[in-house]
Image (spheres, helix red, strand yellow):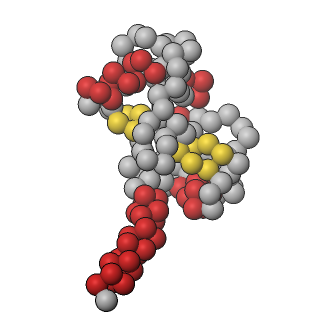
């Protein structure tokens, strides 16, 4: 009897884990200019449910309904974040790489640049962003 109860508990925990992981993503609100148009416009995400237009920093956390629908349907995922939560910082191919400030709009915190964030810098300032994350001055904008 104990083994059956234990087996049921293991199955229940496995079934709950994905839902808990999804609830850790902060989708924000629907304050963006392109909210509720059936496409996710938040540059933190990637996948088939994304808009084909350029991604803008003002759409960060501003298209919640579209992004959550696409995320729940498995059409998008957090850009550069593995299922285990490990961050892929990318490379140093960005124009502002290696300047001591993180320019990747997927992050927030005091280690970020104060200049405007652009789509082209997503995953292209690895050294600066990795160092700031290690120092605790930035964090991923996913929760």
Answer with left or right where residue 27 lies relative to residue 50. left
Q: Is residue 60 visible?
A: no
Single out the residue that lies furthest toward the left. 135
Q: Is residue 1 above or below residue 51?
A: below
Whether residue 127 appears in this view of the structure is: yes
Between residues 69 and 37, which one lies in front from this camera angle? 69
Identify which residue is drawn at 44% across, 36% down.
87
Which residue in the rendered view is the most extreme toward the right? Answer: 52
Most foreground residue, 80 or 31: 80
Image quadrant in which the N terminus is located: bottom left
Task: Classify 128 as above or below 81.
Answer: above
Furthest residue in direction bottom, as rendered: 1
Q: Residue at x 44, y 53 (%)?
A: 25
Residue 138 position within the rendered picture, expressed as x and y whole percent measured from the top left: 33, 31
Q: Position of residue 43 (x, y in %)?
A: 57, 39
* Residue at 65% from the left image edge and 54% from the top image edge: 75
Residue 65 locus on image (x, y percent): 57, 60
**73 and 100: which one is in front?**
73
Quadrant position of residue 110: top left
Q: How many marks?
A: 0
* Residue at figure coordinates x 48%, y 53% from the top left: 27
The image quadrant that residue 20 belongs to is bottom left
Image location (x, y in percent) of residue 116: 49, 24
């Amino acid at each position: 009897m104990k083994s059956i109860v234990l087996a049921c508990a293991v199955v229940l925990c496995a079934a709950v884990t994905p839902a808990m992981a999804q609830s850790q993503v902060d989708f924000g609100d629907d304050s963006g200019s392109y909210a509720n148009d059936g496409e996710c416009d938040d540059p933190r995400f990637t996948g088939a449910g994304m808009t084909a237009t350029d991604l803008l920093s003002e759409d960060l956390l501003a298209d919640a309904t579209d992004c959550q629908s696409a995320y729940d349907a498995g059409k998008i995922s957090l850009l550069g974040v593995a299922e285990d939560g490990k961050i892929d910082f990318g490379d140093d191919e960005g124009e502002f790489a290696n300047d001591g400030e993180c320019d990747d709009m997927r992050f927030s915190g005091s280690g970020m640049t104060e200049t405007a964030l652009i789509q082209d810098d997503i995953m292209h300032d690895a050294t600066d962003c990795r160092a700031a994350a290690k120092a605790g001055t930035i964090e991923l904008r996913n929760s």
